[in-house]
Amino acid sequence: MVNKGFLLDTTALIDFFRGEKIVTMVSELANKLPLAVSPVTIAEIYSGIRNAEIERVEEFLSSLILYPIDGIISRRAGLYQKDYRQKGITLGLADCLIAATAVKHGLILVTKNVRHFPMPEVSVIEH
């Protein structure tokens, strides 16, 4: 698979906004390939955002490529959840949608929760 960029998941963005060590990592990644985000991640960020953070968060999010969820991503996410459930592994639909977005667009997923993304076709960088 040719990597076309990096998909930042919610854990990566939360740590980035908190100024943790991932700030340097995100800067280095952005120098290599484009940074992207899923609409699911944006929803998760806004569900916990503080009013004082909105302007700074919106400015950063607007600099990222946004890959919308389409039928292909939705189908793949549903199948991930179904297939892993049959193996006795519970995955959240949000994580399945993020994983399916990464796969469809050839993106490397940047996350702190590697165990949420056991799919072998998902390339993951743990931060």
Image (cartoon, rainbow, N blue to C red):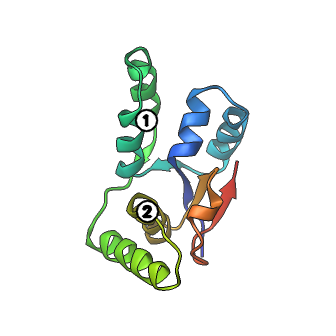
Q: Which amino acid, mark 2?
A: Gly
Distance from label 2 to label 1 (Cα)?
23 Å
Relative to residue 71, is residue 30 depicted above or below? above
Label 2 neighbourhood size at 10 Å, few (<14), some (14-19), many (20+)? few
Q: Nearer the viewer, residue 82 or 6?
A: 82
Front residue of 28/126: it is: 126
Give the quarter of the figure containing the N terminus.
bottom right
Q: Which residue is mark 2?
A: 92
Q: Secondary structure at mark 1?
A: helix
Q: Is residue 41 visible?
A: yes
Q: Which residue lies at the image location 61% right of the left edge and 35% below the top edge? A: 15
Toward the left, the furthest residue is 71
Quarter of the image where one finds residue 25: top right
Question: Disc 1 designates what residue?
Answer: 61
31 over 24 or under it: above or below: below
Where does residue 12 sit, x and y in percent of width and height? 59, 43
Is residue 62 something that shows in the picture?
no
Q: Nearer the viewer, residue 77 or 87?
A: 87
Who's the residue at 52% across and 80% down the image?
A: 88
Kindly identify which numbered label has been placed on residue 38.
Answer: none
Q: Position of residue 85 (x, y in %)?
A: 45, 79
- Which residue sits at x=26%, y=72%? 71
Q: Nearer the viewer, residue 82 or 103?
A: 82
